[in-house]
Amino acid sequence: MHVFNKIFSSLLLLSLIGCGGDSLSLLPTLDSFKQESEPVQNKIDMIWVIDNSGSMAPSQQALADNFESFIQDFVNKAFDFKIAVVTTEAFIKRYPALTSYPDDIAEFRDGNPTDGPSGYAVISSDLMTSGGMSQQDLVDLFVLNIKQGTAGVGDERGMESLIAALNEPANDGFLREDADLAVIFVTDEEDFSASGTPDIPTYIYLGPQWSSVDYDTAGKANFPYYNETEPLASNDENYWLTPTSEIHNAIFAAKGVDPSAADSGISVHSVAIHDQECRTALGGAGRTLAQRYAELSALSDGLSLSLCDDFAASLDLLSVDIIGKTTEFFLKKTPIVSTLKVSVDNVLLAQSPTEGWTYNAEENSVIFHGAGVPQAESNVSVAFTPTSL
């Protein structure tokens, strides 16, 4: 659901030449679009799902210290963005019996328990363009919103919490119909989102079941419940981990987008523990491999980054990937790849995976990278010879 106003024109000429011979002239097809400044284009809505359990203080701080590496590309490219934060305990809103938690637990976070409110549960580019704030001001607001502390529920259900936030009436209006959506999970635990048998599920604490989980040689948890070979039974009820495909479909439903759509404008990413080496480096016990997050990310071609890698580099990769997906240009015909010519403001752009463009054969699209990402109001054209009429 990309937000560029795309003006497509195609010119194909089939010439018949007489005197006993037929000749086919196949001229290049031209697909072009212009990024307009009014209405504001390049729209992207971003939700960060932050693990606020007992082991997450160092990772929250690392994210806070390096967030500028993420936000600066969106500012430099004049993106119209919105950013919100929710914790991995927002799922509690589903369980009315849990009365000891605040009623606003599924709402986007405005500040944190230690430092108080930031005043902005949603951080947007409008705060700079019309609100007089600086990029550093936005970074400072984000830091307040993501440093959610470590007193959260140890039964981390990031996926279930995301869905709870998307369905929370107080968060209505965050998702824009003409904007892309990016979700980023930051956690040192696996996702424990569960589906119970009753319509209104009885809460069961799954955390202790994972505290000493072992892994096989393939890195898979030796836990039948995790491997979905049998349910976890409690109080005469059966609980299964919610399939990642079900979570994927719920995200798309919240946006009103068909999950099978190629140009969905939705991507899910994770910064988590994806191998035993990282798990050991972070202390092992109480931390688990995030295989379900990797599965969910793969369903939307998102990134699965390591909590142990340099945060600045990881956040830069995230911004590049999200921007690349938002500016992806889908072609109407399949090109002969060697004939592709991409121009920005009548200047030929180099084919480069870092500072230009690349062709995505699977989606039949052109993806822009780095300095090659067009600014607002740029004229962009893609010319090529199609493989067939």
Image (spheres, rainbow, N blue to C red):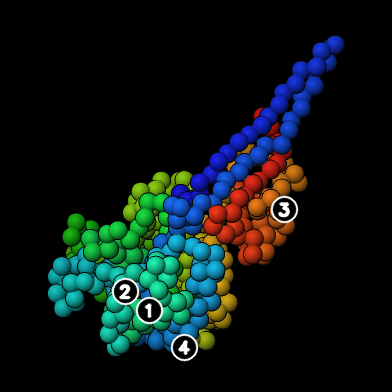
**What's the mark number on residue 283?**
4
Residue at 47%, 66% in the rendered image? 269
Name the spot of residue 78 as percent of width and height, x first: 51, 64
- Compute the Cα span from label 2 to label 3: 42 Å
Q: Please state, as top left, top right, bottom left or bottom right, where the C terminus lies in the image.
A: top right
Q: Is residue 106 visible?
A: yes
- Compute the Cα span from label 3 to label 4: 51 Å
Name the N-terminal-most of marks 2 and 3.
Answer: 2
- Compute the Cα span from label 3 to label 1: 39 Å
Q: Is residue 207 visible?
A: no
Q: Are the residues tagged 2 and 4 within 8 Å (C-beta)? A: no
Residue beneath label 3, please?
348
Count of numbered circles in the view? 4
Q: Amino acid at mark 4?
A: Gly
Q: Are the residues tagged 3 and 4 within 8 Å (C-beta)? A: no
Kindly report which numbered mark, 3 or 4, lies closer to the viewer in this rendering.
Answer: 3
Residue beneath label 2, please?
120
Disc 4, SS? loop
Name the N-terminal-most of marks 2 and 4.
Answer: 2
Name the N-terminal-most of marks 3 and 4.
Answer: 4
Q: Are the residues tagged 2 and 1 within 8 Å (C-beta)? A: yes
**What's the mark number on residue 141?**
1
- Compute the Cα span from label 4 to label 1: 30 Å
Q: Is residue 368 toward the left or the right of residue 349 in the image? A: left
Residue density around tag 3, few if under 14, some if 14–19, many if 20 or more, within 10 Å: some
Residue at 56%, 48% in the rendered image? 34
**What's the mark number on residue 199?**
none
Kindly report which numbered mark, 4 or 1, lies closer to the viewer in this rendering.
Answer: 1
